[in-house]
Amino acid sequence: MSTKRKGEDKSDKERTSGLFSISLAAIAEMARVIKFEEVAKHKERDDCWLAIFGKVYDVTSFLEDHPGGDEVLLAVTEKDATEDFEDVGHSDSAKEMMEKYYIGDLDSTSVPPRKKYKPPQQVAHRPDDSGFAMKIMQFLVPLLILGIAFALRFYGKKED
């Protein structure tokens, strides 16, 4: 007596191996980990990958459709673009759209450390005697100019 149901013509072994191979393929696709060096290589208009939120996206086909233009996306290649993505304030639908461009997870150990902005060092202002000299000069120079102007006017009238 057969225990197979209607429509079942595969053996248990075939069915199991079929499910097993599908599961392995799905796991392999989901578990693809991409090193940052690999992401950084894809920085051209005809091959553009971005790293955002620890995931890697192949946005090559989206470059022409991006509302901000392709230059915006190309400018954030070769780095973790998460902060740039968040700064713009993308909509929920834009975030959902990203899923179709997802190609793998970013290997976080391969991401170079962020360079923090370091403002240029300023020379410390040291107050010294030049402050006093400067105040005297600000007072004396206009007086000197005024004295020269009066002298020229006085000598100019005397010669007439």
Image: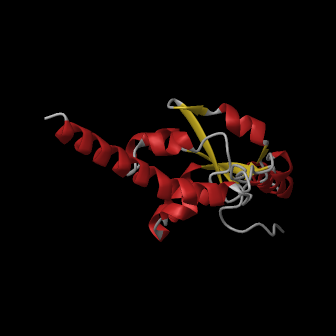
* Count of residue discs: 0
- Where is the N terminus found, in terms of image quarters? bottom right
Residue 27 position, x and y percent, is 78, 54
In the displayed structure image, the side of residue 109 where residue 159 appears, left or right:
left
Horizontal and vertical percent for residue 38?
A: 74, 35
Q: Quadrant of residue 130?
A: bottom right
* Residue 84 in sight from this viewpoint: no
| Above or below, 129 relative to 160 | below
User: Which residue appears at 61% of the width and 41% of the height?
Assistant: 77
Residue 6 in view in this figure: yes
User: Which residue is found at the position 37% from the left and 52% from the top?
Assistant: 67
| 95 on left or right of 22 | left
Closest to the observer, 148 or 51: 148
Q: Is residue 108 left or right of residue 141?
A: right
* 23 and 139: which is toward the camera: 139
Q: Position of residue 119 (x, y in %)?
A: 69, 53
At x 74%, y 56%, the residue is: 124
Figure quadrant of the C terminus: top left
